[in-house]
Amino acid sequence: KKKLLEEAKYYQILGILNYLAEKLKDIELVSFEYSGSYSHKGKTAGTNILEDVKSEDLSTGICAKSPGVITFKLNCDFDVKELEIGGFKGDTSIWYPDNGSGAQILTSLDGKNFTKVGKIPSGYGKEKKLVKLTKSAVRYIRFQHTSYLGIGYLKLIKIEED
Protein backbone atom coordinates (compact mmCIF):
# COMPACT_ATOMS: atom_id res chain seq x y z
CA LYS A 1 0.00 0.00 0.00
CA LYS A 2 2.79 2.41 0.85
CA LYS A 3 4.55 1.79 -2.48
CA LEU A 4 1.28 2.22 -4.36
CA LEU A 5 0.72 5.49 -2.45
CA GLU A 6 4.14 6.73 -3.60
CA GLU A 7 3.25 5.92 -7.22
CA ALA A 8 -0.17 7.58 -6.90
CA LYS A 9 1.52 10.72 -5.52
CA TYR A 10 4.04 10.76 -8.36
CA TYR A 11 1.35 10.42 -11.03
CA GLN A 12 -1.19 12.54 -9.07
CA ILE A 13 -3.95 9.91 -9.23
CA LEU A 14 -6.27 11.57 -6.70
CA GLY A 15 -8.80 8.76 -6.34
CA ILE A 16 -6.13 6.25 -5.35
CA LEU A 17 -4.30 8.87 -3.26
CA ASN A 18 -7.38 9.65 -1.19
CA TYR A 19 -8.36 6.01 -0.77
CA LEU A 20 -4.89 4.91 0.37
CA ALA A 21 -4.41 7.92 2.64
CA GLU A 22 -7.56 6.89 4.51
CA LYS A 23 -6.55 3.22 4.69
CA LEU A 24 -3.06 4.03 5.99
CA LYS A 25 -4.19 6.35 8.79
CA ASP A 26 -3.57 5.27 12.35
CA ILE A 27 -6.52 5.10 14.73
CA GLU A 28 -6.64 8.11 17.03
CA LEU A 29 -9.09 8.92 19.78
CA VAL A 30 -10.14 12.54 19.18
CA SER A 31 -12.73 13.13 21.91
CA PHE A 32 -14.86 11.44 24.55
CA GLU A 33 -18.10 11.88 26.47
CA TYR A 34 -19.01 10.11 29.68
CA SER A 35 -21.67 9.83 32.36
CA GLY A 36 -19.63 12.08 34.68
CA SER A 37 -16.66 11.74 36.97
CA TYR A 38 -16.71 9.53 40.06
CA SER A 39 -15.85 11.25 43.33
CA HIS A 40 -15.71 9.96 46.89
CA LYS A 41 -15.01 12.08 49.99
CA GLY A 42 -13.82 14.97 47.85
CA LYS A 43 -11.42 12.89 45.75
CA THR A 44 -11.98 12.24 42.05
CA ALA A 45 -11.01 8.88 40.57
CA GLY A 46 -8.99 9.05 37.35
CA THR A 47 -7.63 12.04 35.53
CA ASN A 48 -10.52 12.09 33.05
CA ILE A 49 -8.21 13.34 30.30
CA LEU A 50 -8.39 11.77 26.83
CA GLU A 51 -4.61 11.55 26.34
CA ASP A 52 -4.24 9.53 29.55
CA VAL A 53 -5.95 6.42 28.13
CA LYS A 54 -2.83 5.95 25.97
CA SER A 55 -0.71 5.23 29.06
CA GLU A 56 -0.10 1.51 29.48
CA ASP A 57 0.60 1.64 33.24
CA LEU A 58 -3.15 2.01 34.06
CA SER A 59 -2.45 4.68 36.70
CA THR A 60 -4.37 7.38 34.81
CA GLY A 61 -7.56 7.31 32.81
CA ILE A 62 -11.29 7.92 32.82
CA CYS A 63 -13.59 6.84 35.66
CA ALA A 64 -17.33 7.23 35.14
CA LYS A 65 -20.03 7.32 37.78
CA SER A 66 -22.84 4.77 37.77
CA PRO A 67 -24.40 3.86 35.42
CA GLY A 68 -21.09 4.08 33.59
CA VAL A 69 -20.95 5.18 29.98
CA ILE A 70 -17.83 6.29 28.09
CA THR A 71 -18.02 7.03 24.36
CA PHE A 72 -14.92 7.75 22.27
CA LYS A 73 -14.89 9.35 18.83
CA LEU A 74 -12.18 8.29 16.34
CA ASN A 75 -10.42 10.39 13.69
CA CYS A 76 -12.15 8.50 10.84
CA ASP A 77 -13.97 5.24 10.07
CA PHE A 78 -12.03 2.02 10.68
CA ASP A 79 -12.76 -1.69 10.48
CA VAL A 80 -11.86 -3.37 13.77
CA LYS A 81 -12.19 -6.81 15.29
CA GLU A 82 -10.13 -6.45 18.47
CA LEU A 83 -8.88 -3.97 21.02
CA GLU A 84 -6.61 -3.77 24.04
CA ILE A 85 -8.10 -2.41 27.23
CA GLY A 86 -7.07 -1.95 30.82
CA GLY A 87 -8.93 -0.60 33.84
CA PHE A 88 -7.94 2.30 36.05
CA LYS A 89 -5.80 1.16 38.99
CA GLY A 90 -4.67 4.54 40.25
CA ASP A 91 -6.13 5.49 43.63
CA THR A 92 -7.43 2.17 45.00
CA SER A 93 -8.55 3.84 48.22
CA ILE A 94 -11.55 5.21 46.27
CA TRP A 95 -11.68 3.03 43.13
CA TYR A 96 -11.72 -0.73 42.53
CA PRO A 97 -9.54 -1.44 39.43
CA ASP A 98 -11.97 -3.99 37.95
CA ASN A 99 -14.93 -1.56 37.97
CA GLY A 100 -16.42 -2.05 34.53
CA SER A 101 -15.81 -5.78 34.08
CA GLY A 102 -18.62 -7.15 31.96
CA ALA A 103 -19.46 -3.78 30.41
CA GLN A 104 -20.87 -3.88 26.90
CA ILE A 105 -18.70 -2.69 24.02
CA LEU A 106 -20.71 -1.04 21.26
CA THR A 107 -19.71 0.57 17.95
CA SER A 108 -21.30 3.10 15.63
CA LEU A 109 -20.56 5.07 12.49
CA ASP A 110 -22.96 7.94 13.24
CA GLY A 111 -22.79 8.23 17.04
CA LYS A 112 -26.51 7.45 17.35
CA ASN A 113 -27.08 3.84 16.31
CA PHE A 114 -24.85 1.46 18.26
CA THR A 115 -24.30 -2.28 17.86
CA LYS A 116 -23.00 -4.57 20.58
CA VAL A 117 -19.69 -6.13 19.49
CA GLY A 118 -18.24 -7.51 22.74
CA LYS A 119 -17.74 -7.02 26.46
CA ILE A 120 -14.95 -6.00 28.82
CA PRO A 121 -13.40 -9.11 30.41
CA SER A 122 -12.85 -9.60 34.13
CA GLY A 123 -9.32 -8.98 35.31
CA TYR A 124 -8.82 -6.00 32.99
CA GLY A 125 -8.15 -3.84 36.04
CA LYS A 126 -5.02 -5.80 36.89
CA GLU A 127 -3.48 -5.92 33.40
CA LYS A 128 -4.27 -5.00 29.81
CA LYS A 129 -6.47 -7.52 28.04
CA LEU A 130 -6.87 -8.27 24.34
CA VAL A 131 -10.57 -8.41 23.49
CA LYS A 132 -11.90 -10.07 20.35
CA LEU A 133 -14.86 -8.20 18.90
CA THR A 134 -17.46 -8.89 16.28
CA LYS A 135 -15.96 -7.27 13.17
CA SER A 136 -17.45 -3.84 12.61
CA ALA A 137 -16.89 -0.44 11.04
CA VAL A 138 -16.20 2.09 13.80
CA ARG A 139 -16.21 5.88 14.15
CA TYR A 140 -17.55 5.80 17.72
CA ILE A 141 -16.91 3.19 20.39
CA ARG A 142 -18.97 3.09 23.57
CA PHE A 143 -18.45 1.21 26.81
CA GLN A 144 -21.63 0.85 28.84
CA HIS A 145 -22.13 -0.65 32.29
CA THR A 146 -24.92 -0.75 34.87
CA SER A 147 -22.39 0.19 37.56
CA TYR A 148 -19.13 2.18 37.68
CA LEU A 149 -16.76 2.08 34.71
CA GLY A 150 -13.06 2.86 34.49
CA ILE A 151 -10.73 2.80 31.49
CA GLY A 152 -7.03 3.31 32.14
CA TYR A 153 -5.83 2.18 28.71
CA LEU A 154 -7.47 1.77 25.31
CA LYS A 155 -6.06 0.85 21.92
CA LEU A 156 -8.22 -0.20 18.98
CA ILE A 157 -6.57 -2.48 16.45
CA LYS A 158 -7.64 -1.91 12.87
CA ILE A 159 -7.98 -4.70 10.37
CA GLU A 160 -5.08 -4.52 7.94
CA GLU A 161 -5.98 -5.32 4.36
CA ASP A 162 -3.40 -6.50 1.85
Image (cartoon, rainbow, N blue to C red):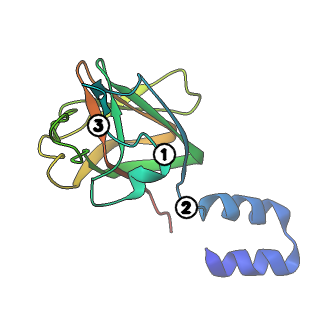
Q: Earlier in the sequence, mark 3 or mark 1?
A: 1
Mark linked to residue 50: 1
Distance from the alpha carbon under mark 1 to that under mark 2? 17 Å
> Is label 3 in contact with label 2 (beta carbons under 8 Å)?
no
Can I make out residue 105 in this image? yes
Q: In this orientation, which residue lies closer to the viewer: 132 or 57?
A: 57
Closer to the camera: disc 3 or disc 2?
Answer: 3
Q: Which residue is label 3 attached to? A: 150
Q: Earlier in the sequence, mark 3 or mark 2?
A: 2
Q: Amino acid at mark 3?
A: Gly
Give the residue at the far front of this rendering: 42
Q: Amino acid at mark 2?
A: Asp
Q: Badge 2: how crowded within 10 Å, few (<14), some, or many (20+)?
A: some
Closer to the camera: disc 1 or disc 2?
Answer: 1
Mark linked to residue 12: none
Element marked by disc 2:
loop
Element marked by disc 3:
strand
Distance from the alpha carbon under mark 3 to that under mark 2? 24 Å
Among the 4 quarters of the image, the one containing residue 112:
top right
Among the 4 quarters of the image, the one containing residue 12:
bottom right
Mark linked to residue 26: 2
- Residue 73 placement, left or right of 42: right
- Position of residue 133 relative to residue 12, above or below, is above
Position of residue 108 measured from the top left corner of the image (x, y, whole percent): 50, 31
Q: Amino acid at mark 1?
A: Leu
Quadrant where the image shows the N terminus: bottom right
Give the residue at the far right of this rendering: 12
Distance from the alpha carbon under mark 3 to that under mark 1? 13 Å
